[in-house]
Amino acid sequence: MPAPGTGGLRPGQRGGPVTAGCHTGGGSAVATATVPRLALVGSPNAGKTSIFNALTGLHAKTGNYPGVTVSRFVGTCRVGADRYVVEDLPGTYSLEPISADEQILVDVLDGRVDGVARPDALLVAVDATTLRRSLGLLAQILARRLPTCVLVTFTDELARRQGSLDVDALGQALGFRSSR
Amino acid sequence: MSPTGELPVGRQEVGDTGCAVLADLRPGVRARVVQVVAGAPAIGARLVDLGFSPGTAVEVVRRAPLGDPVVYRVKDYEVCLRRAQAACVQVSGVDR
């Protein structure tokens, strides 16, 4: 699977800078109350796990959500002196769940899973080649009103197909500050 | 909808509307989604979330040898639906 090209978009609200590509994370993946928790969400095959691996440097802890056989992936990421816990959530096309893993995703976003704190911020992976479809899911996610960073993935694949995307204009339309 | 008025909620069958459905279209045909009517609301909602929202242009790309499933192009990507789900999507403006 090709590594997705990532261009970041983030609201100019709170939180430290978050950019893909920090490989210095790792160590203990145990979540503590003081470390901000970031959750990766997006459609299936949007590149969440590639971003997760880039952020956590593969120092991830895998396990299960309590009571269901849905795999759970949690890792840590270091940006300068700051540490973040990153959670790779199951992919979905909608926040109206129709399967166990989609239900877990919604329950995590709403802080309804025992022992899993509600994320402090969201990283939303959006595949540039299926952008129009992904906007519906993005709208549902933004309605949760958590601090959100949108990561536009597969921009290299879009370019290969002679497509183009104005990331700045997308950011402007969404009310996000954009960066690359 | 029948010419005489509304059908009881839950009794409306696909086809009662006199509207074409996605499952009736041949490869190469384009149409526009009017609405999605599914027996299970979750199925209808998921079809909309996959891109089959009212007003969206759809093209039939190709069909499996036995006619099911069928690949559709919608919102700049391709998605494959079984006949049962494609029958939930009512379309108009069929352009052969």
Image (cartoon, coloured by chain):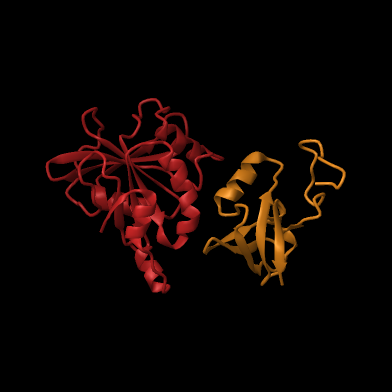
Chain colours: A red, B orange
At 52% from the left and 64% from the top, the residue drawn is B76
Q: Is residue A83 visible?
A: yes
Which residue is most to the top? A114
Residue A28's image quarter? top left
On the image, the x and y values in percent for residue B18 come to 81, 54
Vertical arrangement, residue A36 with respect to residue B26, above or below? above
Which residue appears at 51% of the width and 44% of the height?
A94
Residue A24, position as x, y percentages in the image: 16, 49
Q: Nearer the viewer, residue B83 or A149?
A: A149
Assign the C terminus of chain A to one quadrant of the image.
Answer: bottom left
In the rendered structure, the answer to whether residue A61 lies left or right of residue B2 reads: left
Query: How many callouts does the rendering have?
Result: 0
Q: Residue furthest left?
A: A81
Quarter of the N terminus of chain A within the rendering = bottom left
Relative height, residue A90 to residue B31 (above, below):
above
Q: Is residue B30 left or right of residue B5?
A: left
Could you say which quadrant of the image residue B56 lies in?
A: bottom right
The answer to whether residue A58 is seen in the rendering is no
Question: Which residue is pictured at 34% across the width and 54% down the height?
Answer: A171
| Closer to the camera in the image, B50 or B18 | B18
* Residue found 69% across the figure and 61% down from its top: B68
**x, y percent for residue A163:** 42, 70
Q: Residue B10 location, x and y as percent?
A: 76, 37
